[in-house]
Image (cartoon, rainbow, N blue to C red):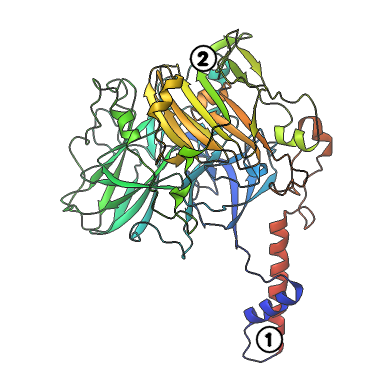
Amino acid sequence: MSPSLSWASGLCLFGLLLGLCSADDPFVFYDFKVSYMTASPLGRPQQVIAINGKFPGPTINVTTNNNVVINVHNKLDEGLLMHWSGIQQRRSSWQDGVLGTNCAIPPKWNWTYQFQVKDQIGSFFYFPSINFQKASGGFGGFIINNRPIIPIPFPTPDGDIVILIGDWYIRNHTDLRKSLNGGKTLGMPDGVLINGKGPYQYNTTIVPDGIEYETITVHPGKTYRVRVHNVGISTSLNFRIQNHNLLLAESEGSYTVQQNYTSLDIHVGQSYSFLVTMDQNASSDYYIVASARQVNESLWQRVTGVGILHYTNSKGKASGPLPDAPDDAFDKTFSMNQARSIRWNVTASGARPNPQGSFRYGSINVTQVYVLRNTPPITINGKQRATLNGISYVNPSTPIRLADQYKLKGVYKLDFPTRPLTGPPKMETAIINGTYKGFMEVVLQNNDTKMQSYHMSGYAFFVVGMDYGEWTENSRGTYNKWDGIARSTVQVYPGAWTAILISLDNVGVWNLRTENLDSWYLGQETYVRIVNPEATNKTELPIPDNALFCGQLEHLQKAQYISSATLPRASRMGLVLVLLMFYALIVSLNC
């Protein structure tokens, strides 16, 4: 070996001899320690859920096609699952982090998620999906960047800013959970947080002194990509930055037709990214505002998040009244028309070289139709429950996907009704039997008095229509069949409907739910089971080496210990590469 040969070259040469050096997509590793900590986001000490001692948790930042490995240590006193909202988990619902596919990570255990962000770009977030834990935190941003060879449809921004907004209660998640279990509602939130912090004291009557608020520092004349996520419990929020235009550029993995908004309603579970140019004179700092929508705003005035946008050349603190929210007290259609204005940019490349809009969804024949109706919570068997089509979902002790793997009978029923039941409501584990490579139309009918958001794991669906009133067959005449946005979470207005189309090409068991945490906790969800009937099924990854077992399969679970035999495949490969690097270093030093 030549003395000038670097140890890295030696490693690759040695790896080639073993068949380990290839052009495979790289691995990205994260280590999450999920624990309780004390914080005072609204000025009063309370228990929150932190990741690596941070509230909110760190931002995951990866690139299209990266293999992502996240080792989650559960340091809570109850089971934990982490859900990667909007990440499509191509071919592997095993990693989705919801009870239909995963057993909970027991306290004091760790479990490693491993998935590829295949052919995805955009702005997403993660959060704990069970036990109402999201109400105490545990959430953070998730960015998937374009590969360098795929252009983005706007000039490269000068910086990236993640903003997490959401309603917040001073009571922790266990207290809120007890209220729901006792048949009570959660009531009005205590405030709105921006990046885990309370409001700037813009009004001494409404906002007490001593609350830590979020400050985002920017440089004049620069343009930033601002990624905003509503990680709250159940409150729609209007987001705005004083005196600044929000140029909408992307939503949950789809580039949008770029248009300016002075403010945008962001509903629970939704994510947007804006291009914001710092073009003001910096006579003072500027307000960043997230205020409640679709509520009695005079009563909810104190439930407003306020942060500060600080120019490096700012001449003083922000003062005066907040910028106004849209005044639609007498125009119920304002927010809906704003939502309809968000269109897919069909000329932009997404994660692949071909235009993201080349998928002509409007010309595909629909193979299944489901009309899903929710109503206000009702009492079933003496318990307060929420329903879809008269079914209140009950999580089985054995996850659905695990039951399929081991051919267990009676864990669930493939009989979720296509239309609302006419009889009395029921509590069941009823799920949807999706047809592989089929094209499903889902109509979400909101017969409640409050705003709802719906999410489907594993997919980006096409939002083709929304309107007030009851959906009918004739409503299809109003559908957008050309450039409806593709996303994973959509709002449904009170007394209104929203229609989505889903191309069922991702095999697995996928959660379809309301994002309103109280209604989700009370059973407003189901799953879509999609099976490839071909004998040689190469469309789904096998059960992971480190799968957890519970329910009827609890006897298969071994005590947890750390060794190379129990690490998932990616971790074992990492160990091999470390050993090879050590070997190559020794070789290069001896040459």
- Residue 507 location, quadrant: top right
Which quadrant of the structure image shows residue 6?
Answer: bottom right
The numbered disc on residue 253 is none
Task: Give the SS element for disc 2.
Answer: loop
Say if 403 sits above or below 419 in the image.
Answer: below
Circle number at residue 589: 1
Percent from the top left, x then y, of residue 37?
53, 40
Q: Please give the name of the residue rendered at 40% of the width and 40% of the height, measured from the top-left corner.
A: 482
Given residues 52 and 24, the one toward you in this image is 24
- The answer to whether 252 appears left or right of 239 in the picture is right
User: Can you see residue 175?
Assistant: no
Q: Position of residue 313 (x, y in %)?
A: 21, 58
Residue 38 position within the rendered picture, expressed as x and y whole percent measured from the top left: 50, 38
Q: Nearer the viewer, residue 369 or 216?
A: 369
Point out the residue furthest to the right here. 555
Q: How many marks?
A: 2
Label 2 environment density (alpha carbons within 10 Å; few <14, some 14–19, many ≥20): many
Q: Quadrant of the N terminus?
A: bottom right
Residue type at mark 2: give it: Pro
Q: Which quadrant of the rendered structure holds the C terminus?
A: bottom right
From the viewer's perspective, tell me whether residue 497 is left or right of residue 175.
Answer: left
Q: Quadrant of residue 105?
A: top right
Name which residue type carries label 1: Leu
Mark whose residue sits in front, 1 or 2: 2
Identify the residue position indicated by label 2 in the image. Answer: 377
- The x and y percentages for residue 298 are 27, 21
Secondary structure category for the residue under label 1: helix
Above-or-below relation of 420 to 200: above
